[in-house]
Image: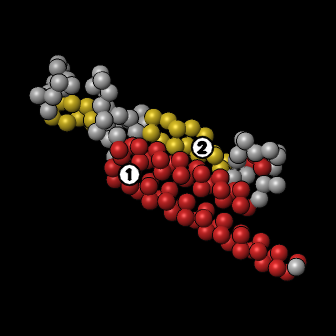
Amino acid sequence: MYGTLDISTSGMIAQRDRLAAISSNIANRHSVAADGTPYRARTVRLAVGDPNAASLEGRGMGVHIASIEEDRSAFGLRWDPGNPFAIKEGPQAGYVLESNVNPVVEQINAMQASRAYEANVAAAEATKTMMAQALRLLA
C-alpha cells in the first residue's frame, strides 16, 4: 500500500538529494578542470510520482528526482591576466572564466529544500500520530 508515510518519505529523499546537489555546487564553486574549464552548477529537477513503486497507484504519488542537469548559463569573467587559464587573445584577453554558481541563489535554494524536508518530516509525524490514535481506538 502506498500511503501518506510513503509520500512524505519520497519527499524527504528528494529534498535530501537536492540539498546534496546544492552543497556540491557551493563546495565546487572555485573548482577548475585540468583544461581550465570552471565548474558548472548542477540543477535538480523533481517530478511527480515514484517510478519504482510496486503498485500502479503508487507510481502516481510522491515525488522523485527526474534529472540532475548542468546549468548552461554563461560563465562569469574575472580579470586576472597572470593566471595560466586567462584568455590569451581577443576582447576578453586577460580574463579568467569563473563558475556560474551564484552563492546567494544556492543559499536560498538550500533554505527552501531544508524547509520542504522539515515539512515532510512534520507530515510523517502527524501521520504516525493519527495511526497510533486509530490503533488505540480499535484496541
The residue at which mark 2 appears reads as 65
Q: Position of residue 139 (x, y in %)?
A: 88, 79
> What colour scheme does the image use?
secondary structure
Q: Which of the pair 124/102 is nearer the observer?
A: 124
111 w.r.t. 22: above or below: below
Query: Extreme left residue here?
Result: 82
Q: Residue drawn 30% across and 23% down? A: 34
Q: Residue at point 21% right, 25% down?
A: 85
Task: Determine the image quadrant of residue 51.
Answer: top right
Decide if residue 42 is on the left or right side of residue 17: left
User: Which of the pair 30/90 is nearer the observer?
Assistant: 30
Task: Pick the residue in front: 18 or 87.
Answer: 18
Which residue is denoted by mark 1 in the rendering?
105
Q: Are marks 1 and 2 in contact (CB under 8 Å)?
A: no
The Cα atoms of the two marked residues, 1 and 2, are separated by 20 Å
Q: Secondary structure at mark 2?
A: strand
Q: Is residue 36 above or below residue 23?
A: above
Q: Which mark is residue 116?
A: none
Looking at the rendered image, the quarter that the N terminus falls into is bottom right
Residue 127 picture quarter: bottom right
Viewer-side label of 1, 2: 2
Residue 75 visible in this rendered orientation of the protein: no
